Image (tube, helix red, strand yellow):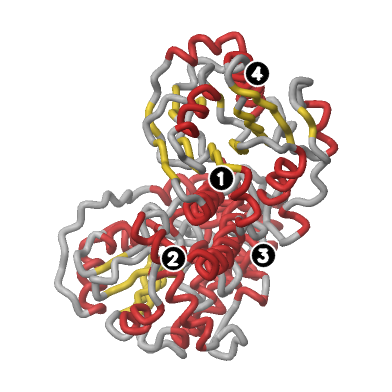
Amino acid sequence: MLKIAHIINPVKVKESVDLSWAQPVTFETMRIAKAYAESTVDVTLFSAQFPEDADFVPDFFIKTKHLERSALDIGEFYKRRKLPLLKDILDRLYSSSDADYLVYSNCDIALMPYFYTALAKMIEAGRDAFVINRRTISGTYSRVEDIPFMYAETGQSHKGYDCFVFKRDLYPEFELGRICIGIQVIGRLFVWNLFSAAKKFEEFQERHLTFHIGNDRLWQRDEYADYKIHNQKEAQTVLKKLDEKFNSVSKLGKSGYLGAFKLPGKKIQRAAKKHKFLFIAGLHRSGTTVLADCLREHPRISGFENTGLPKDEGQFLQTVFPIALKYGGPGKFGFSKEMHLTERSPLLTEENRDKLFREWSQHWDLSKPILLEKSPPNILKTRFLQAMFPGSYFIVIIRHPVANAYANQKWSETSIYSLLEHWITCHRVFYRDREHLKNVFLLKYEDFVKDPDRYLREIYGFLGIEGQTRTVAVRKEINKAYFARWQAVIDKHNRLKKILRRFKYRALEKKIKSFGYSLYKPG
């Protein structure tokens, strides 16, 4: 009888998190599927868990040795998440079972009753490795009691990889690095291993064998971006090892599984001489996104799109310099000296220049002459970027400090006073650096939203390209609500408190006036 061992990573979570109800559904559907296949397939269910999660694992799972390390042991991250390493989970499965085939799936992936019997038929056809893409059903039902209704939903196909089946003998050939689960890239890396090591690999995109409730994307939240960067870096190392062992790069490239990781070095070097680099900078919530969206419409400009990372910012798509989240994120990063990079930075090397271009080029259309990258922290890196890519063009957008502070407050969780100080700090650095820049276009947010077409024409002239009709919507009155909130705070104080408040902000007012703004006349 065919023997299959299936492992997942159960984890305790708060009741408000969707995993709190998704995991019990996964557990129960695995139990049902095992029972359904009892007469034809010998199925054993395993779990890999941290000690604190052990009592959450149902009795019908065999608990492997407790996990001992997580992403927190191998790197520093803005938001602490105790994410296991894929290798640690699979090592436990391999050492705990002598099953013919091994299965790993995410803990929120539920099974149809006939899942294991279907696997047996797929294996019988001679496949030694395959991936099964889930179907996504609605979030109408979420309780274990509702499982029959979940079975009844056809759902929609999903391109993500979250259930992997492979012959036990293949595992010693895998290269998994230190990639962690629960974050992007893991599925692609797993497929690379299956495709490279197997003799007959297949991806099943339309089989109704697994399902996921809803289509949440927790891993895309801003505060987890540095985890994806970690996984991307590990994936590059893994890919190199797989290529040395299996000549994987060319094979994966032809199959389409290499995706954004494919770009030959010689092509990068040639392309770097043919393009004009355009960097957009400005504090978070200063209009960098809407400006980039407008410029990206131009047929001669290529900008990042659909990267799966916050606002398609280039800072998250590279591993050369630190991202803002490492130093506090919006409203805080500018207080760290490490975020200010110039042509004197030790990071400015030929190796890093090639690496940065290689990482960003994966997301540009290199047939277009102007390559656009947008990240708010660029405001502290203009000199560095100009040194990296000589002749670069910069558009720096500035928004009124009061409006910018209120817009950032919910993201930075700090005081308006601190946010104003941060605004001053960052713009002081930029104004000093501006003297070293060859091609820079300074733009006030308030001017841009008032007459976007005028300033887009000026920008196109700055770049030396023809005009383009705008279709992106630009909202004009957003600042007014923030100015009203600021004025209300001032007005509610009596005369003495007004005087004290003015005294508190007097030093800031003087600094802000040097940039052409005022705290007391925001409108």
Mark seen at residue 31: 4
Three-letter amino acid code of the residue under disc 1? Trp
Which tag is nearer the camera, tag 1 or tag 2? Answer: 2
Foreground residue among 139 and 405? 139
Three-letter amino acid code of the residue under disc 4? Arg
Q: CA distance from mark 3 to mark 2?
A: 35 Å
- Where's the N terminus, which quadrant? top right
Mark seen at residue 249: 2
Q: Quadrant of residue 394?
A: bottom left
The mark nearer the N terminus, 4 or 2, is 4
Q: Residues within 10 Å of mark 1 (few under 14, many from 20)?
A: some
Q: Quadrant of residue 301?
A: bottom left
Q: Is residue 93 left or right of residue 481?
A: right
The mark nearer the N terminus, 3 or 2, is 2
Residue 104 vertical position relative to residue 233 in the rendered view, above or below: above
Q: Which residue occupies 55% across, 53% down?
A: 408
Residue identifier under label 3:
327
Q: Residues within 10 Å of mark 4 (few under 14, many from 20)?
A: some
Three-letter amino acid code of the residue under disc 2? Val
Foreground residue among 496 and 260? 260
Which percent across, then down, holds residue 427?
53, 73
Which tag is nearer the camera, tag 3 or tag 2? Answer: 2
Q: Is residue 163 left or right of residue 449?
A: right
Q: Which residue occupies 51% across, 25% down?
A: 213
The mark nearer the N terminus, 4 or 1, is 4
- Where's the C terminus, which quadrant? bottom left
Q: CA distance from mark 1 to mark 3?
A: 20 Å
Contact? badges 1 and 2 (CB < 8 Å): no
